Image: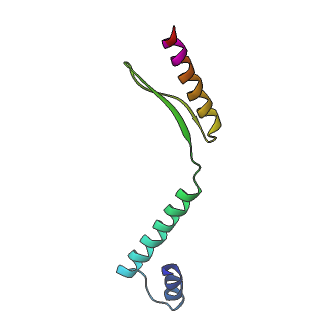
Amino acid sequence: MALIAAINAAAAGNSMSGPLGFAVFGVVVGFLGWLMRKQAKQSYEVQITTAAGEQKLLRSTEREMPAAVVAALNQAIADREAH
């Protein structure tokens, strides 16, 4: 809505250099940031924590691959503790 007001003001020859111009600029930048965030793809990571610190093992935009790695790690830990 503010973008339409800014276009109308510019078409009428009004200057947008005052506080209204800054407000319109802020709204436009905020909208663009929201739009970019909405279009960003979600990613999934596998992280482990050891005595040496935290390590990122895998990052993927598909959930299946990290889930399979986590399941395999959990199974390996369970098998090791059973012996």
Residue 44 found in image quarter: top right
Is residue 48 rendered to the left or right of residue 71? left
Above/below status of 77 relative to 62: above
Q: Is residue 1 visible?
A: yes
Q: Which residues are magenta?
A: 77-81
Seen in the picture, residue 67 relative to 13 is either above or below; the reply is above
**Residue 59, image quadrant:** top right
Q: Position of residue 52 (x, y in %)?
A: 38, 19
Reply above or below: 18 against 35: below
Q: Residue furthest bottom?
A: 12
Q: Main secondary structure of the magenta part?
A: helix
Instruction: Measuring from the top left, give residue 79's x and y in whole percent.
Output: 55, 14
Magenta region includes residue 33: no
- Which residue reaches farthest front? 82
Residue sitting at x 57%, y 47%: 42
Seen at 52% across and 57% down, the residue is 37
Q: Of residues 62 and 37, which is closer to you in this image?
A: 62
- The residue furthest left is 19
Could you tell me how many numbered marks the image carries? 0
State the residue in front, 61 or 66.
66
State the image coordinates of residue 36 (x, y, percent, origin top left). Answer: 55, 58
Q: Residue at x 50, y 68 (%)?
A: 31
Residue 18 visible? The answer is no
Which residue does the image show at 49% across and 90% down from the upper left?
13
